[in-house]
Amino acid sequence: MNDTPGAGASTRCTGLRRITGLDPDRLAQIWGREPRHVPAAALPTPFADLLGPGDVDDLLSRRGLRAPFLRVARDGRTLPDAEFTRGGGVGAAITDQLDDTALLRLFAEGHSLVLQGLHRTHPPLLDFSQQLAADLGHPVQVNAYITPAQSTGFSAHYDVHDVFVLQVAGEKRWRLYPPVVTHPLRDQPWQEHAEAVEQAASAPPRLEVTLRPGDTLYVPRGWLHAATALGGVSTHVTVGVHVWHRGHLAETLLDRARREVLGRADQRTPLRPGVDVGDADAIGDEVEQVRAALLDALADVDAQQVAHGLAARHRAGQRPAPVPPVATVAAADGVVGPRLRPRLHLAARIERGDDGYLLVSRTGRLPLREGEAVTVGRWLDGEPVDLDDGLARRLLLAGVGTLPGLREEG
């Protein structure tokens, strides 16, 4: 199988440099190990364009957001959704839309508001998050925390993903403590280590810093942190980075080896009648045979097979740049070949299988003829090619290509 990398990977790292002033090689020196505070003066622009106060109120009151897109918390307690949601009114069979009147009261009482999934609901953060994910090679999500003056929304805890904190407005005092669990996994939440977390947070912090508008704070996963708003309303954006790690490589290696073992007829034969699979002595010989087969299969799995196995998970971790469905269909009636360009953040590859060629991307799988595969591969790589209108329309209507002038975020 021949894989051709698709378009969309940035060589400029504009998202990463905007929030850290670093490229991936320099970030690697602290990545996953040490927190880092980057003051606004060291960065190119502040963050007000990503999420302003008016944007927050608009999301809370005019967008019809539902409960999964908001949490409300105070002093470490998260409120039930029913305390800040209500029905959508006439003609809307929805029972959990945000209730702006309830949110007004709760915020005045000192509750923090956590807007979740802003990488899907707020265009500036959608564009930014997609660029940052392309820079990092790791999937990202975006939340925002709006905290009243002198309030702490959450007590000391750790996250199971890395975080970039972008201070948008107001000031917030952060206290960071070393991990009690190094590089915790998603099934190792801080609540399972609450006593150790509380004890660690009673010691002097390793880092204590006040974030001001335009500042960034990098918090590796597992590092304990707590924050308190100072003097006024504080708004910060958190970019959660769901990092790939060696455990993902191990999962893929083992899955490939398991499938190889199951492909062997001698490993699919039944165990003897009357066997007690709960008795180690009864199955010991069989276990050793399977272990030997797995070790042999593992030795035969190469890095290309691991990469191919992870490719689908990589594609599923982010979405491609938005395209306008109605405008795209209308534009398909014109001449599209010379103007078509690859949709951003596709994670596209040309794969050769038993039945021909496939363009595999975040939009799905599109069959291609051999001559088309060569042309499309060059087009994805940014080379000048002549796309005939028939092929161009297929790419356009499959969501693989887009046209200048149509609204495209990213």
Image (tube, grey):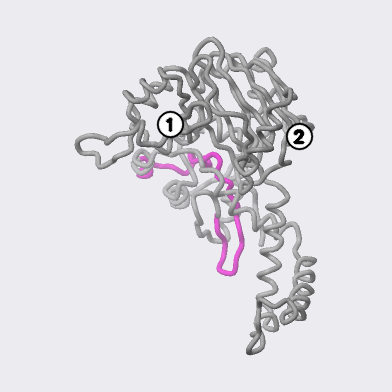
Residue 134 rendering spot, x and y as whole percentages: 62, 38
Asked if residue 270 lies left or right of residue 121, the reply is right
**Mark 2 packing: few (<14 Cα in 10 Å), some, or many (20+)?**
some
Residue 42 rendering spot, x and y as whole percentages: 70, 15
According to the image, label 1 marks what residue? Answer: 405
The vertical placement of 79 against 373, above or below, is above
Q: Which residue is at a point 49% across and 26% down the rendered structure image?
A: 74
- Report the front residue among 117 and 354: 117
On whether residue 346 falls in the magenta region, the answer is yes
User: Could one spot residue 360 in this view of the protein?
Assistant: yes
Question: Which residues make up the magenta segment?
Answer: 331-359
- Amino acid under label 1? Gly
How many callouts does the rendering have?
Answer: 2
**Residue 380: mark in rendering:** none
Residue 56 rendering spot, x and y as whole percentages: 43, 22
Instruction: Determine whether the residue tagged by mark 1 lies in a helix, strand or loop.
Output: loop
Q: CA distance from mark 2 to mark 1?
A: 44 Å
According to the image, label 2 marks what residue? Answer: 33
Front of the two marks 2 and 1: 2
Residue 61 rendering spot, x and y as whole percentages: 34, 25
Of all residues, the one furthest to the left in this rendering is: 90
Instruction: Determine whether the residue tagged by mark 2 lies in a helix, strand or loop.
Output: loop
**Mark 1 packing: few (<14 Cα in 10 Å), some, or many (20+)?**
few
- Amino acid under label 2? Arg
Quarter holding residue 328: top left
For marks 2 and 1, the one nearer the N-term is 2
